[in-house]
Image (spheres, rainbow, N blue to C red):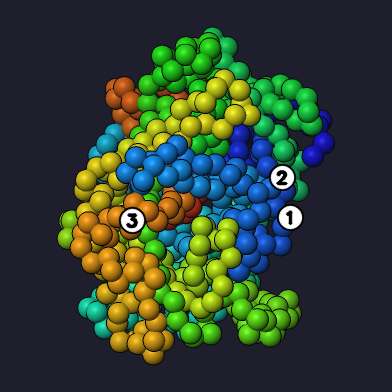
Amino acid sequence: MQKPSQTQFDFIIIGAGSAGATLAARLTENNQFSVCLIEAGGKDKSPFIHIPFGLAFLSRMTNLGWEYDTEPQSQLNNRKLFWPRGKVLGGSSSLNAMCYIRGVPEDYDRWSDMGAKGWDWETVLPYFKKSEKQQHGESELHGADGYLSVSDLCHTNPLSDSFVEAAEEIGLSKVTDFNSADREGLGFYQVTQENGQRCSTAKGYLTPALTRPNLTVLTKALVEKIQINDGVATGVKLQLDGQSIELTASKEVLLCAGAINSPQVLMLSGIGPKEHLTEKGIELKADLPGVGQNLQDHLDAIVQHRCKNRNSYSISLALIPRYVKNAFNYLFNRKGIFTSNVAEAGGFDKTQSAADIPDIQYHFLPAILLNHGRATAFGYGYGVHVCGLYPKSRGEIKLRSNKPNDPAMIDPHYLEHPDDQKVMIDGVRRARKILGAPSFRQYQSWEVGPGPEAQSDEQILAFIRKKSETIYHPVGTCKMGDIGDVMTVVDSELQVKGVKGLRVVDASVMPTLVGGNTNAPTIMIAERCADLIKQQYS
């Protein structure tokens, strides 16, 4: 984009992802606020973003993501894991599987108990409702007037139907709304789509706001650091069109760069663990040892079957006529296979380690997935993704250098807590039970992962160590909580400790992972923060 016509704004927002686009839309509703939204990636032009089935190809499009890799994981055979994060308007909401999941009330009440006052379920529910444009209208738990379209799938695969039918066959409930009071069981996900197209925050929130004269959007602009003068955030220094420029914020800088980039930007700006910043040659502005710590993510293992049934979403010459027919159906009617988010069905279940709430989540794919979709899987098949929802292992983000163009070091410390291993082992066993239900017998399939030879806990754990991957839910690296806690980074109004005029607003502020996908909770956080800001400056 062109250089900004002005260099001073009331608010500067770093990152136009799930939180940043939401904040930009809500703050510019007040025409007295001038807002600059800065995105390191480009515009969300790719048709693969907007066509839901394009999800199958997005992992190969290196121009849309940060293309991160973790450090070698000691509990995963020293593998480096691929961590894709959105680098485009809409951020990861432009690349995700569109599943609309909030978590459970206990998740947010736990935040409050940990010192994040005002983030209990009763307080956050109105912001989930405010964000939501629910296909079925307003209800006690759902909203209908928001920017984020939430709808039933327009198309489901017969294999996904079999997955849902298997629930009652193995003693689970069939769930129609995973965001209701009781979500334990299997069912179809609702998705962030409208009229068969993805509704990212760029589409739902940002598009209506782009016509407002008080919003400036800069793309392909990399923030080098936040300017801190006498303990106050006064603006940002960024790279744009090969030049370094400075923008000033008269009210606040709002950091919405995500669980990896937000702590990185803070540390590059002199806010973080004193010893680490000194080691990297960065002038200390605020000694906050919690910056980059408390990293949590959902680890995922896939129980996969091969079969000869052509209902599978597969690469096959035999399926070309079906895909051609569906291309026309999508083009003219917004219906058919191309409206599918691929991860159509799923659910929540309890392992032997669970207390009162489910501790694992399933995503069912009527397709074989190899290397996040970066490798082509020929032939037919299907699989159940299993992730442990409440890992006890904690990782960290550190700087590789003091150069903003160098990616941060990502070390999730997966499975270092033995309880996480138990949950994943039991989760794999339960997924196998689902795929062994009578509704799947018609497909005459055979298990290829872990494979029939893996039966003991040790053999299943060996499979998990060899094959598990992220399911893309990193959080926690700028923890919100009691300001008396030395590891807290932001207070309950998301203000950075020891620095005025600076907030972090994204998944990095979550004290703990929620029980499910993290996109809707991240949007909720931005919705509530927008209200806090409006109240402060009213």
- Mark 1–mark 2 Cα distance, whole angstroms, equals 8 Å
Q: Which residue is under mark 1?
A: 45
**Mark 3 or mark 2, earlier in chain:** 2
Q: Which mark is residue 464?
A: 3
Q: What is the residue that sits farthest to the front in this orientation?
A: 453
The residue that mark 2 highlights is 42
| Nearer to us: label 3 or label 2 | 3
Could you say whether the residue bearing mark 1 is in a helix, strand or loop? Answer: loop
Does dot 2 land on a helix, a strand or a loop? loop
Disc marking residue 17: none
Asked if residue 82 shows in the view, the reply is: yes
Question: Could you tell me which quadrant the C terminus lies in?
Answer: top right
Say if 150 sits above or below 366 in the image.
above
Q: Position of residue 230 (x, y in %)?
A: 54, 9
Residue at image point 50% right, 25% down: 399
Measured as percent of width and height from the top left, residue 65 is found at 61, 47
Please state which amino acid type lies under the numbered disc 3.
Answer: Ile
